Amino acid sequence: MDALPARHRRTLETQQLCAHSVGIWLLWPAALAWLKYVRGYRIRDLTQVRRRFQKLLAETSGPLLLCCNHLTWIDSMLVQWALVSSATASRSTRLFVWNLPEKKNFNQNVGLRTICYLGKCLPITRGGDREQQRLVLDKVRHLLERRELVLAFPEGGRSRTGRFDADRVTYGVGRFVHDAPDCSVLCIYLRGDGQERMSVLPPKGETFSVDLRLVQPRSRSRGLRAHRDIARQIVATLSEMEQDYFDRR
Amino acid sequence: MDRQAVQEEIIRIATPFVKAPAMLTSVTESTSLIDDLKVNSARLVDIVLAFEDSFDIEIEDDEADKIKTIGQAIDMVLTKVN
């Protein structure tokens, strides 16, 4: 049974409608132009990354949560760019993914709040009021049950060490997966060639590598213990992907 | 199990996760795990799971969400143990 109250379901539907009618067609192309032509970013082997994403997507039938390491404020934009073209997202709006940014970073003015809203963001206050967090968790569960794609950063914030920081991982991602039956997790390792530590923006002209790995984390435990087990499996995958990245470099 | 013994065990369990260890010397039942002892909210889950192991009890998600202070943790444990 859907735990999300009807008024919050309507709020989400309204945001989705606005994002699909304005965000995808105006905001996202403008954001892409900024990434490509103003900042000069490039994603290595972009076509292969997108093909691999489509292949992995086809392998899943249930809910799909995307989990990525986190080093800059624009990681969610870079992931969106890496996974599908603007044209593909406009044809299949499910592929324009939901994000869970830290509220204080995107709540500073009306402009940022509007961008956030149209960019399918559900702001969350990390370590904040439990009721507010629970509402966001319920919204995410609702979205996953409807096969919407949701991107989460298991570290909860940008890594302070420059490496995937397993010690900071919150178990919320474990709860998402546990609460959505048959949920798969697409682990995404994203890193710019020159990105040594966290920053607001990657340096101009940066080239990014993107690695994707699909996992089905499960736990035989229940409740919080299951959330922790599942989160730890996601952590292990992202840690392996990071090790692979540095081994290849 | 008396209240004092439960408090001591709770503090022992929480200590490795506390980011403000100086506060441990003046812990009262109104001390907040997150705001005063600076326990990361994710690590609060580890603490609750350690309570389950240590006191041989089960704490549901909703109940865990209500644990904010040492006093609330003691109340939760005593309710379950008894």
Image: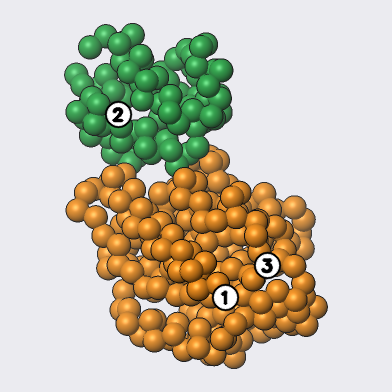
Chain colours: A orange, B green
Residue highlighted by disc 2: B51
Tell me which residue sits at (24%, 31%) in the image.
B53
Give the percent coordinates (x, y) of residue A26. Answer: 71, 81
What amino acid is found at the position of numbered circle 3 in the picture? Gly
Distance from the alpha carbon under mark 2 to that under mark 3: 44 Å
> Do the residues bearing badges 2 and 1 touch, measured as CB atoms within 8 Å?
no
Considering depth in this image, is A42 or A62 the residue closer to the camera? Answer: A42
Question: Vertically, is A128 above or below A35?
Answer: above
Tell me which residue sits at (76%, 59%) in the image.
A110
What secondary structure is found at the residue carrying circle 1? strand
Confirm whether circles 1 and 3 share one chain. yes
- The chain carrying label 3 is A
Query: Going by the image, does A218 lie left or right of A65?
Result: left
Query: Going by the image, does A141 lie left or right of A40?
Result: left
Tell me which residue sits at (19%, 19%) in the image.
B82
Quadrant in which residue A181 is drawn? bottom left
Q: Nearer the viewer, mark 2 or mark 1?
A: 1
Residue highlighted by disc 3: A194
- The chain carrying label 1 is A
Q: Residues within 10 Å of mark 3 (few under 14, many from 20)?
A: few
Distance from the alpha carbon under mark 2 to that under mark 1: 42 Å
What secondary structure is found at the residue carrying circle 3? loop
Give the percent coordinates (x, y) of residue B46. Answer: 37, 37
What amino acid is found at the position of numbered circle 1 in the picture? Ser
Residue highlighted by disc 1: A209
Q: Nearer the viewer, mark 1 or mark 3?
A: 3
Residue A159 at least partly seen: yes
Distance from the alpha carbon under mark 1 to that under mark 3: 11 Å
